[in-house]
Structures are given as C-alpha cells and as structure tokens.
Image: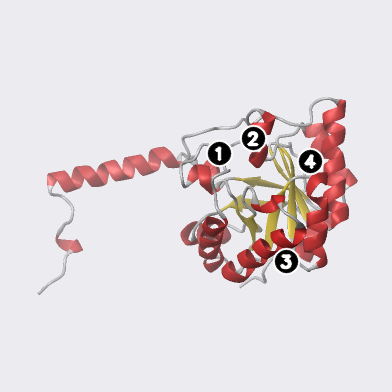
Amino acid sequence: MSARVTVPELGRMKREGRRIVCVTAYDYTFARLFERAGVDILLVGDSLGMVILGYETTLPVTLEQMIYHTQAVVRGASRALVVSDMPFGVCHGPGPVVMDAAVRIMKESGCQAIKLEGGARVADTIRFLADHHIPVMAHVGLTPQSVHAFGGFKVQGRGNAAASQVLEDAVAVEQAGAFAVILEGIPSPLAAAVTQRLTIPTIGIGAGPECDGQVLVGYDLLGMFDGIKPRFVKHYLDGSAAITTAVTRFAQEVREGVFPGPEHGFNP
C-alpha cells in the first residue's frame, strides 16, 4: 500500500513539476474507486448540496452534513489526502469560532485538512488556523458560496482590476499559511500568472491547463449529474445513460419474471 499523500508532499509535487489530481467524493464507495484510480486528493466538497442533496446552490449545506459525508470518504481512503469543505456561514466568524468547526470536522471525521472559500477577507482566519496547525486549502476566483453576490456562477478575474484582485487574494492566502489554493472560474492566462507567482500548489477548475493540478466534481467527471454543466467540465463516462440503461434492464427482467433466476436463490 502506498503511503498517504501529505501536505508537504503536495508542495514537493509543485516544485518537481508533478501534476496533482483531485476529485470530489461524498461517500465510501466512490472514495475507494477514486483512490484505486490513483487520485492524490479527495475533496469532500459542499458541492454535495447540489449533486447529492438536490439544492440549487451549496449554501444550505450544514456542518453536520459535511462531517457525515467526510466520515464516509475517510473510511474509503487510505492513500489520498482527504480535504473537507467548510460550509457557508461557518467560515464567516472570528478565528476561534471557525477553529471550533474545523476541529469538529477533523476530530469527528478523521480528515487531514479543511478548505475555506475566500481570499484576502479570510486571510486572518486562515492564519489563525494555520498557527494552530490546522492545514487549510484556500479557494479563490469563482467561489460558489458567493453565488448571489456574483449574480450567478460567473467567471471572475476578467479585466485588469478584477484580475489584480484575484492575484491579491491568492497571494494573501499563501502568506496567511494556506498549503494550496483552488483557482476556480478564472481566465487561463490569469491562472498561469498566479501559479507562477505562488510557491504553494494551485488546483484549477475552469482555470486552464497551467495550474499545478486539476479538480473536477466526481459526478461531473462520470457524467452522472444532469444539472449545471459548466464549460470546463469533461465527461469521461456517460454514467447517466449507463445507469439508466442498467436499471431499465433490471426493471424489465423483474416485470418479465426473468430475474431472479434459479442461480440467484438458495437451496433448502
């Protein structure tokens, strides 16, 4: 069994030019499958609010739900670094309040790090957590918890002023002690500039090919989510069609009396 990916290892991967692979997971079974495929980071994203719970945004997700799903992912992961999202509202309080939530997530789930949305405005919170040895992955650019402030899931960092703000946010979270930063929904040249500027790894999603790593929502990667399909998503499997076909066959065989057959029963 390979050794678990660690926070320092991710830093070495950036320095050595090894790309980092990150996928979101929300349960034990998918965690095992993704890890078997060699994923470096399993992110238990609050995107579960949309792809698992059916909400229109990530905002309704609670701390208890994040802990519950992170526990399941941790049980399925022996190598990948497991990172859990801090849900909307939790990360907006003072450092000690956020730390209480982070400690709950890490102690009750067993994950190795937490993720916090926001740039310069949450730098003090990141610094407080990092000073207390809580590994923090930051998230700048299109931050889904700010969907209403942005007026939708819109690309950020277009234009000189907006690009400067994204760069400022990325530098601020690095200086505050974040070990990595997700760059979401920003122009590719901007993501390349941020990646070159920072010493910590950048993980892109809708940020072009020059980041140190890439992340996709697991259900998007597998073609299982029928909701929003951003331009940056690539389906590596038509999971929705495959699952529908399989369940349709099951239903047909049940109705025709074909399943279960003799081989699926038990002898007296």
Which residue was labeled with disc 2? 147
Q: With 183 as the anchor, is 67 left or right in this view?
A: left
Residue at position x 15%, y 44% from top?
Answer: 255
Mark 1–mark 2 distance (CA, rounded to whole Å): 8 Å
Residue at position x 83%, y 54% from top?
Answer: 124
Which residue was labeled with disc 1? 57
Q: Earlier in the sequence, mark 1 or mark 4?
A: 1
Q: Earlier in the sequence, mark 1 or mark 2?
A: 1
Which residue was labeled with disc 3? 6
Answer few, some or many: residues within 10 Å of disc 3's Cα (few below 14, many 20 plus, some between 14 and 19): some
- Does the rendering let one see residue 178? no
Relative to 260, residue 188 above or below: above
Look at the image and tell me in which quarter the N terminus lies.
bottom right
- The three-letter code of the residue at mark 4 reads Glu
- Among all residues in the image, which is located at the extreme left? 268
Marks 3,2: beta carbons within 8 A = no
Answer few, some or many: residues within 10 Å of disc 4's Cα (few below 14, many 20 plus, some between 14 and 19): many
